[in-house]
Image (spheres, helix red, strand yellow):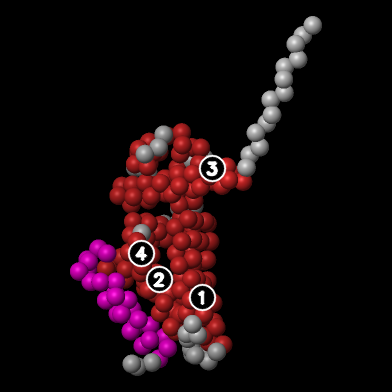
Amino acid sequence: MTAVRPVTAVRPVTIDAMDSTSTRRRATRAKLYEAAVTLIAEQGFSATTVDEIAERAGVAKGTVYYNFKSKTELFEELLRFGVGLLTTSLQRAADETAERGGTKVEALDAMIRAGLVFIDRYPAFTQLYVAELWRTNRAWQSTLLVVRQEAVAVVEKVLREGVEAGELSEEIDVPLTAAALVGMVLVAALDWQAFQRERSLDDVHGALSLLLHGRVSGRRD
C-alpha cells in the first residue's frame, strides 16, 4: 500500500512580504537607472552595454534582463522615471504656492526653483534628456514626447489659471510660453552646471525670476 504523504501547509504570501519584494525591486531599478544614465551621458547610448550597466549598478547581468526586456526598454523607462520626478517636483511647487495663497506668477517662480533644484540633483539625466529632445530617430521618441508634454502641461495649467484670473495677459500663447519656460530652466541650468559653477542656486534662480517677472507678468520691481 502506497504511503500517503502528509500535506505541507502552503505558507501564505503576506502583504509585508509583497511590500518588501516591491521595495527591493524599486531599489534595484533605481540603481540601474542611475548606472544607465551616468554611462549613457558619458559615452552615448550605442556605446553603452548591458554588461557595463550591470557592473556599474553592482548587480548581475541577468538582473538587468529580469527588470527590463532590453537596453532600449531600460532607457525608455529611465526617461519616464526621470521626467516623472521632474513633473512631480513642478506640481508640488505649484500646489504649495496655492496652499499658502500665492499668485500664479509666484507659483511659476516656485516651479522655476523646483526645476533648478531637480537639475542640480540630477545633472546627468538632464543632460541626457535635453540631448534626446533633438533626436527624432529613436525608438523611444513617442515616449519622450508623452513625458515631455506631461511636464509642460503642469506649467500650462498655471499659466491658463493666471490668464483666467486676469493676473496674466490674454495675449500669452500658453502652450508656447509653457514650453519656453521649461526650456529656459533646462538650458540655463545646464549652462550653470557646465560653465558657471561658481554661482549658487539662489543666484541662478534670482536671474530667472527677474526674467519671469519682467517678461511674463509685466512687473517692474
Residue 87: give its label.
none
Q: Amino acid at mark 2?
A: Ala
Image quarter (top left, top right, bottom left or bottom right) of the C terminus: bottom left
Which residue is at the front of the view, 2 or 166?
Answer: 2
Task: Look at 56% across and 87% down and name the residue there.
Answer: 164
Q: Is residue 143 magenta?
A: no
Q: Is residue 84 visible?
A: yes
Q: On the image, numbered disc 4 is attached to which residue?
A: 119
| Magenta span of residues | 193-218
Choose the circle earlier in sequence order: 3 or 2. 3
* Distance Cα–Cα, label 3 vs label 1: 32 Å
Choose the circle earlier in sequence order: 4 or 2. 2
Task: Look at 50% across and 71% down and name the residue there.
Answer: 91
Query: Considering only vertical position in the picture, is 46 above or below 82?
Result: above
Q: x, y percentage for residue 168?
A: 48, 88
User: Which callout, 1 or 4, points to the residue nearer the camera?
Assistant: 1
Q: Is residue 44 visible?
A: no
* Label 1: which secondary element: helix
Choose the circle earlier in sequence order: 1 or 4. 1
Q: On the image, numbered disc 3 is attached to which residue?
A: 21
Residue 95: give its label.
1
Q: Amino acid at mark 1?
A: Asp
Q: Amino acid at mark 3?
A: Thr
* Label 4: which secondary element: helix
User: Which callout, 3 or 2, points to the residue nearer the camera?
Assistant: 3
Q: Is residue 205 magenta?
A: yes
Q: On the image, numbered disc 2 is attached to which residue?
A: 114
Which residue is at the front of the view, 137 or 144?
Answer: 144
